[in-house]
Amino acid sequence: MKSLPFVVLLFAGLCSAMAQVPAPLAPPTDNNAIPSVPEAQVQPVVQKIVERTTVVERPTKNMSREERRAYKVHRFAERIDSLVQSRDYVFWPNSMQEIRGGAIQMIYNEYFYFGFFIDHAEIHLPTERGASQFIEVLNFDSMNIRNYQASPIQAGWNVHFQIVDGAKCYVADFIISTVTGEAILNLLAPDVSMRYVGSILGHMRDFKPMQ
């Protein structure tokens, strides 16, 4: 009998040794098993990004009078732009008028205002019908703001949106001047339409009531 080649004997020995190694244990297939390390639930973070005009203060010491006046006008317009774009400001009226032929009534009560903020609106305004008959004071807050649009116009802004309070829907239309700072609010309510004239400020704390 002829001897087998050395290579064949070596291969046969390796196969025999591998056959004796136990197979690795399979992982359990129990679907109800609790893993040793629970998987973390990652919640996406949604952040509102508000674009605002940056108001840069420049030294005016070396400016001429004409340059200083022009710079103040430009800086005032930038501040109005920044307020409108922030969607966080308060409208303070000084007069009101029913849109359909009403007489202009002055507002001396400093606590009437229209607050427009990022997530809600605060409406505290008087209304009237006729020459001097006050019929209602709008006094409500709402987090339901719809169809917001802010469009730049010549020397100012037109801001238009809807406010829902229960079953009532109010339409607010602002015309805001970046030259004079005057703000006109046309407020269309379900039973009356009013026009208010005033100005806007950045926040409630910026307004100081008369002593």
Image (tube, rainbow, N blue to C red):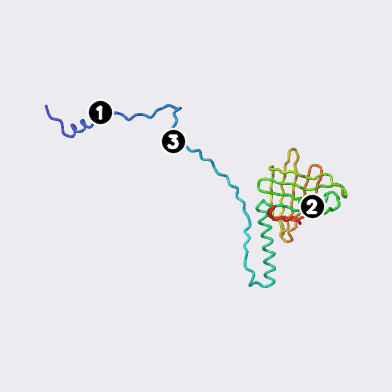
Front label number (2 vs 1) = 2
Quarter of the N terminus within the rendering: top left
Q: Earlier in the sequence, mark 2 or mark 1?
A: 1
Q: Position of residue 185 (x, y in %)?
A: 76, 51
Q: Amino acid at mark 1?
A: Gln
Q: Contact, CB < 8 Å: mark 1 with mark 3?
A: no
Q: Which residue is mark 3?
A: 37
Quarter of the C terminus within the rendering: bottom right
Q: Earlier in the sequence, mark 2 or mark 3?
A: 3
Residue at the image position 62 percent from the left and 62 percent from the top: 56
Left/right of residue 40 with respect to residue 143 in the rendered view: left
Q: Earlier in the sequence, mark 1 or mark 3?
A: 1
Q: Contact, CB < 8 Å: mark 2 with mark 1?
A: no
Give the structural element (helix, strand or loop) at label 1: loop
Q: Which residue is mark 1?
A: 20
Other residues around mark 3 within 10 Å, as few (<14) / some (14–19) / many (≥20): few
Residue at the image position 34 percent from the left and 29 percent from the top: 25
Q: Which residue is mark 2?
A: 109
Q: Position of residue 159 (x, y in %)?
A: 71, 51
Residue at the image position 73 percent from the left and 41 percent from the top: 165
Q: Label 2 to label 3, Cα distance in Å?
A: 63 Å
Q: Label 2 to label 1, Cα distance in Å?
A: 97 Å
Q: Amino acid at mark 2?
A: Asn
Q: Label 1 to label 3, Cα distance in Å?
A: 34 Å
Farthest residue, direction front: 211
Q: Position of residue 140 (x, y in %)?
A: 74, 43
Quarter-of-image position of residue 54: bottom right
Give the structural element (helix, strand or loop) at label 2: loop
